[in-house]
Image (spheres, coloured by chain):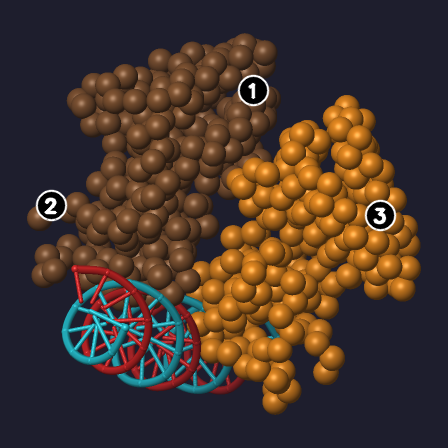
Chain colours: A brown, B orange, C red, D cyan
Amino acid sequence: MNEQLQPLKKPVRTGKAGRSGTQDDIVYAHIFEAILEQRLAPGTKLSEEALGEIFGVSRTIIRRALSRLAHESVVLLRPNRGAVVASPTVEEARQVFFSRRMVERAITELAVEHATLDQLNELRQMVREERDSFSRGDRGAGIRLSGEFHLKLAEAAGNAPLVSFQRSLVSQTSLIIAQYESGNRSHCSYDEHMQLIDAIEARDAEQAVSLMMHHMDHIDSKLNLDEESASDDLHAVFSHLLKKPKVSAKG
Amino acid sequence: MNEQLQPLKKPVRTGKAGRSGTQDDIVYAHIFEAILEQRLAPGTKLSEEALGEIFGVSRTIIRRALSRLAHESVVLLRPNRGAVVASPTVEEARQVFFSRRMVERAITELAVEHATLDQLNELRQMVREERDSFSRGDRGAGIRLSGEFHLKLAEAAGNAPLVSFQRSLVSQTSLIIAQYESGNRSHCSYDEHMQLIDAIEARDAEQAVSLMMHHMDHIDSKLNLDEESASDDLHAVFSHLLKKPKVSAKG
DNA sequence: TTTGCATTCTTTGTACACAAAAGCATAATC
DNA sequence: GATTATGCTTTTGTGTACAAAGAATGCAAA
């Protein structure tokens, strides 16, 4: 209980905000990152007081961060019961993927029209970082960077509502991957990301969309959503009843 | 300053929540309704203290409601500067409409597959209410009910992320209509809504999507986004600089 | 032993007080 | 007379105390 971070150092990268972080941005980013990197398992209870102590801020800040996360369906906010890390069911996962296909298609088409060379080079840089993460075995960072790639692509498409929706979808997708990805098949999406950028730079809409749809298929096929989801499914079904306050920060 | 509602009576309809309202739901719904019905003009400053006094709750509740509205891009939350009713620019309006076309197409296709007869009858009931509002000259309620129709349709489609995105888009669309609709052409969408329900009930996907797309065209064509947006545009451009604390509750 | 109830304890919900930041007006100086 | 600086006011940001709602535990009765 008495382990506490020195008051809010690491700004993390909150996406793009120039002012890299008011306090709640920082808390938000930390919790989100912890969820993505599976240091916080689905179903884990997120006590306001405990988090406040850990981050050295009051419950007010924590509450705002949790509220944002809840709006993106990454945590579940139960009235009078507090927040838990969301445990998407198989059906919810399917719905997220359906929406993502729709959005990614639109984003790709818009990006072919609007993405600047600067933006495409930024995207390439992100893919390199993603590849480095996987090659040094940091799966959590890899998943996070892969998500940030798709978010950056949405920004390059230049449609604000789509960006906002995509942010929510990417967050949920990351959670789903963390929960359902079948073990050892490494999540090596960086190659497909690179090809996608090339097709966009060539302004080849048909090819770009085709690559994106295949990319979605590949992500999909790595998950246990369809067949063997029996045991995992059972776990997912009951995980919101079970309370396992496994705050797996190093003991 | 000393006019105050008796502490939070009218629950409004917050959408579908069984427990029809914690305090912030009620405040949220009231402010949202006021914006939709143009009792709060774009650019209007939303002071936390004033609203708290009006609704008889503390700033904490107001702040949460404003935060939700900001997440839906209905109000703009400027750090240390407070909240104002959003003033979507022409470009932002175009982006919202682009996203809406995409989402409405998907929703229509899903609704053809999944909507139950009960849901379709509920939708018909909503359209009747919408028609009644317009026929008794209540344009604000009409716009709101029209938006709620599209939201209900999204729920009938059975995809949670789409519902959430649609909620945000509908809110923004209502704001855009309030800001840009060219005067006297009454917003009589209820007829198209009825035809749409019929096509969905007939499970005629092609027809339903076609109707929906034409419906979008019609909404679009009633707005001043394309040509004559000069003066209105100027107003929109500067409304975030000007401060006009026109809290148009009856003085 | 098990089940139902009551009490206690933990955790969230709300209000309020204080601190800090931004805006405004006044005044002084160039 | 215009412009800038400074302090004054208003409004938001944050922390904290208190209230209320759930959950857990223990005791009693069947």
Labels 1 and 3 within one chain:
no
Tell me which corner region of the image, top left, top right, bottom left or bottom right, holds residue B218. top right
Vertical arrangement, residue A75 with respect to residue A232, above or below:
below
- Where's residue A57, x and y in %? 24, 63
- Residue type at mark 3: give it: Tyr
Q: Secondary structure at mark 1?
A: helix
Q: Nearer the viewer, mark 2 or mark 1?
A: 2
Question: Residue A250: which numbered mark, if any?
Answer: 2
At label 2, counting other C-alpha atoms closer than 10 Å, the crowd grade (few under 14, some 14-19, many 20 or more) is few
Secondary structure under the numbered disc 2 in the rendered image: loop
Q: Amino acid at mark 2?
A: Lys
Chain letter for mark 1: A
Instruction: Identify the image quadrant of residue C18.
Output: bottom left
Pointer 3 chain? B
Give me the chain letter of mark 2: A
Residue that numbered label 1 is attached to: A112
Residues B238 and B85: in front is B85
Q: Quadrant of residue B202?
A: top right
Residues beneath discs 2 and 1 located on the same chain: yes
**Quick one: B238 or B208, which is closer to the camera?**
B208
Crowding around mark 3 (Cα neighbors within 10 Å: few <14, some 14 to 19, many 20+) is: many
Residue carrying label 3 = B190
